[in-house]
Image: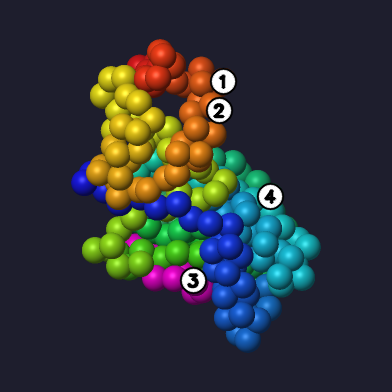
Amino acid sequence: MEFKARLVSWNEIVDWCLSIRKEIVNSYSPEIIIALSRGGLVPGRLLSDYLWIKDLYTIKTEHWGITASKDATAKIREDPTIPVKNRSVLIVDDITDTGKSMKLASDFIKKLGPEEVKTATMLHIDHSSFKPDYYATEVSNKEWTWFIFPWNIYEDVLRLLDKAMTGEHTEEEIITLLASNFDLNISRQLLQDLLSNFRQSGKVFRNNQKWRIIRTS
Ligand code: ADP
């Protein structure tokens, strides 16, 4: 197996964000949420609703260029003037894995003179160099998994196919490849929906019953 990947459901997202809310409500009163784009956008939006915080901003950190392959440094893309001065801030992301994005974002926000900064992620991998103040689930590094969030499914599965497919493959073969390379079980129906999008977007090519990735590099 190359590494483990798994599909995350919308229900899990809701449960994880509700569990973060429960912890926060007893210990912190943030006035503003900053979601890290893109992974923290949906959790940030949910927490904005669950915690009655309408002041929701985003900043973009970039670190993982492509699915499950990391480049060395994380950086803040934009330099926004977010009104954090003297206010209690909650920074939200989907996962702390290396921890670099969250560390970078929290250092960046602290320099803007907030009253207090706390951080929250749905998932926290225990090897992360940064531990969020709030997280719903801790994942052991031994169980390291690429989590395919529902908002990133096309991008992630295409990247996994790109790693696993060597030539032309039938749908059955693709399902087997995903299972053997990533321990990822996806239904025939989901695969067909994904392939249909990839085909319309010029990412894959179909020849009779076989599929091939169109590689640009
Ligand atoms: P952090 O610095 O918060 O640990 P990284 O910089 O390692 O996060 O990764 C940045 C983004 O890459 C995450 O917010 C997430 O969207 C994505 N990512 C990183 N690791 C994983 C993973 N194991 N599964 C799914 N997505 C991940």
Going from N to C along the chain, the mark reached first, 4 or 3, is: 4
Q: Secondary structure at mark 4?
A: loop
Q: Residue at x 26, y 48 (%)?
A: 3
Kindly report the distance in space between the C-alpha atoms of the residues bearing marks 1 and 2. Answer: 5 Å
Q: Residue furthest bottom?
A: 26
Is residue 155 found left or right of 46 in the rendered image? left
Q: Hey, what amino acid is under mark 3?
A: Tyr
Magenta part of the chain:
128-138
Q: Residues within 10 Å of mark 3 (few under 14, many from 20)?
A: many
Q: Residues within 10 Å of mark 1 (few under 14, many from 20)?
A: few
Kindly report the distance in space between the C-alpha atoms of the residues bearing marks 1 and 4. Answer: 39 Å
Residue tagged by mark 2? 197
Q: Hey, what amino acid is under mark 2?
A: Asn
Kindly report the distance in space between the C-alpha atoms of the residues bearing marks 2 and 4. Answer: 37 Å
Give residue 78's quadrant in the image: top right
Going from N to C along the chain, the mark reached first, 2 or 4, is: 4
Image location of residue 108, percent across then percent down: 53, 55
Q: Secondary structure at mark 1?
A: helix
Q: Is residue 187 above or below residue 8?
A: above
Mark 1–mark 3 CB contact (< 8 Å): no
Going from N to C along the chain, the mark reached first, 1 or 4, is: 4
Kindly report the distance in space between the C-alpha atoms of the residues bearing marks 4 and 3. Answer: 27 Å
Q: Secondary structure at mark 3?
A: strand
Image location of residue 197, percent across then percent down: 55, 28
Q: Residues within 10 Å of mark 2 (few under 14, many from 20)?
A: some
Is residue 35 found left or right of 3 in the rendered image? right
Residue tagged by mark 1? 200
Image location of residue 169, percent across then percent down: 32, 24
Q: Residues within 10 Å of mark 4 (few under 14, many from 20)?
A: few
Residue tagged by mark 3? 135
